[in-house]
Amino acid sequence: MDAGVDDVGGYRLIRELGRGGFGSVHLARAPGGGLAAVKLLHLAPDTDPRFAQMFAREVEAARRVSPFCVAQVLDADPHAARPWIATEYIEGRTLAEEIDSEGPRGDGALQRLAVSTATALSAIHGAGVVHRDFKPENIMLGPDGPRVIDFGIARAFEETAGFTATSRIGTLHYMAPEQLEDAARLTPALDVFAWGAVMIYAASGRHAFAGHSQTAVIKKILMDEPDGSAVPSHLRELVLRCLEKAPERRPSAHQILDTLLGRPGHGTAAEAAVEAEETEDAVATRIVTPEGTLLQPTLRETLRPQVGAPVASPADSGTPAAPEQDRTPARERSGAPLRSDAPASPEPVPPFTFAGRFHDRSDTLAEAMWANPRAAAEVFADPDERAALAAWVIEDLRDARIDRGLFRRRPADADLAVARFIAQVRPDLPPAYKGRELPLSALREAAERTPDAMDSGLDVSLEVLEVMAEHGCQDAAHTCGAGSGCDEYRRLAETVRSALGVYLTASAPYVSWLSDPDGVGDRIGEEVAETPFVLAALAPRAWSENVQRHRARVPTLWRSTLPEVPPATAPLAERIGRAMVIPVFAPALHALADRGRELEGEKRRLQDYANRERARSRGQNFGGYLGAAAAAVLLITVAGGGLVSFDWPRFWWGLVLAVVAYFGVFALVHHLVLKEAEVPSEGEGKDLYPAVEGAAEKADRADAAAAELGRETRRLHALRSRAPRPGTR
């Protein structure tokens, strides 16, 4: 349900049924108590003011359509703040839902569907209306038979909402070739083409023109023949005639109905008035009005002439000439510059679909990709979409400006491929990467604020700089020549390239040092990100201060292994390349210093544990000996005397005292030995070797581990002693 909307023109909205390109459809309670389907239209703030007038005419025409096979128009308000139209609510599933659930239709069911939908189209065309979006989703299978819905508003949108030859209303799999090529050629024949495609879908469960991408579908519609093998033989010829590429070769909706009913016919007078004449030569464009209707004149299509055939003039036809359509791209009409070297196509080419719009020129496609970089990156990242774009550019447009290498393999960076494509086709657009505009002045400001690449959020490589340099200069302070890109960007790229070369030389000793058998084992510094070099070249002073902070954070013992920052008098590329060693290798030195501290701490812990276990072993030995001696004395003097004199209470007391003396003396001596050795008492220290029996054995194990850590510590000290200590040269 649309937020804040619960009543439209007396129709109380109950729930939302669906949402599409024109608007949202709601189940509603009509003023008389019945149910209705109310469509609220989506209008942009800049919608052509003629829309309401055009919409009102279309609604009036739709009301004249016989209601027996369509959803009858009940009411509408084209002039409302949000225009709406209410139609009869059809209970049931769409043909698309029925095929998906029950499978393709059999011979008899398909024949009934064909007759009912052809009848509906004949009635719609007879009222002077072209549906323009005839598809399985717009055919409701009601209790009393199929009904066609959602007609009467497409023309108002298409002719007033800024749609051009590169933007179409309709559903791709059911769009006629002329719908894809030329807005001036839209006649009822496009509904006939869609009817044929619907019949194949109903008979087979498959689209008549299927493909792995939108461009592939478009190519099939324009060039390939449909597979009608699933259609029964007595219907197949009629269906395939409806799918002829040329609209003038298709039958009218009334002729389809006559054929299905087994009677000859040529359509009604009203319908014939909006159909294209089937002649061998071209006829002039002329205005015709359906007889007996109150519709405004409809622009009649000029048939495409054969090579060498004369074209009839308006005077020959006896009708006034229609105004010539302005085919200038919208950007040119607005005064924005386009590349003058864009290739002129000698004949119409199939459009390329991007982000829901059709584009017949690489210039407009590049501009759309500039405005929607995420969707553009998906095109270059997807192998099928990239192949379709390549076929369109190379085979259809034959646009030699675009590097074919962009299409030959999956790009490592799809966003960079998008930026390169845009720079080659539309260098007049502002430089941008990943949806972020990158004028050189803005990059310098970002680098001054956050010279650390990790904090800046920038991801700008040398390749990105080179691509941005191809765009026209956006900075008025630069002296770049018109149409030659940005020289300042090129100088920046050259500085970064040189700095990378200096860095590879300066970092080589560190790479070798940290990769020897006693090093950390990783080839640190061999491959580095290019963004830090870009930031350094953009803001060298701020970056140099950041490097000094990196150096100061390295522990003192390891700091001397790093080079000093070259003086400000050195060339910028050399300063960046040599000083970049510091932030690149500082983390490795931090790790080595931390490892040294960990080794020393672990070694001390093992030594303390060994001392504790060794003291515990001594205490156990002394306590055992002294306790046994005390127990023996008591047994001899007390228990033995009681046994000789047959004084049994004394005997038993002697045994008890001997046991108590043993354990008491053992505990006392054990405690005194541990205290003297300053070892924590039992329970205060963690047992590192619980599986080892005996304190002496535990101490031996700890001593061996501490000795191994000592050897590793010595290797670390030896590594530090071999570290490079380059000067500032």
Image: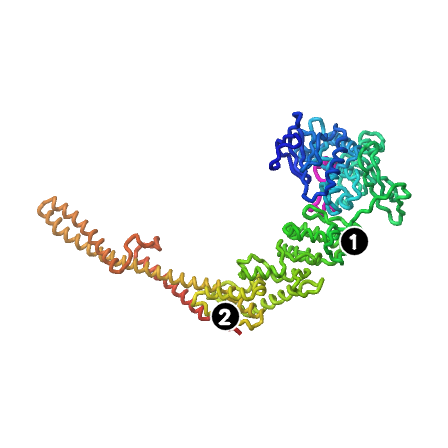
Tell me the crowding category of disc 1: few under 14, some 14 to 19, or many 20 or more residues within 10 angstroms, Cα based.
Answer: few
Q: Is residue 211 magenta?
A: yes
Q: Is residue 339 left or right of residue 600?
A: right
Residue placed most toward the observer, 153 or 408: 153
- Label 2 is placed on what type of residue? Pro
Give the residue number, with chain letter if any, for mark 2: 563
- Label 1 is placed on what type of residue? Ser
Q: Position of residue 499 (x, y in %)?
A: 58, 68
Residue placed most toward the observer, 696 or 20: 20
Q: Which residues are magenta?
A: 199-218
**How much space separates mark 1 and mark 2, taking CA atoms?**
60 Å
Q: Position of residue 513 (x, y in %)?
A: 49, 68
Label 1 element class: loop
Identify which residue is drawn at 66% across, 64% down: 478
Quadrant location of residue 48? Answer: top right
Q: Among all residues in the image, which is located at the extreme right?
A: 316
Residue placed most toward the observer, 273 or 247: 273
Q: How is the image coloured?
A: rainbow
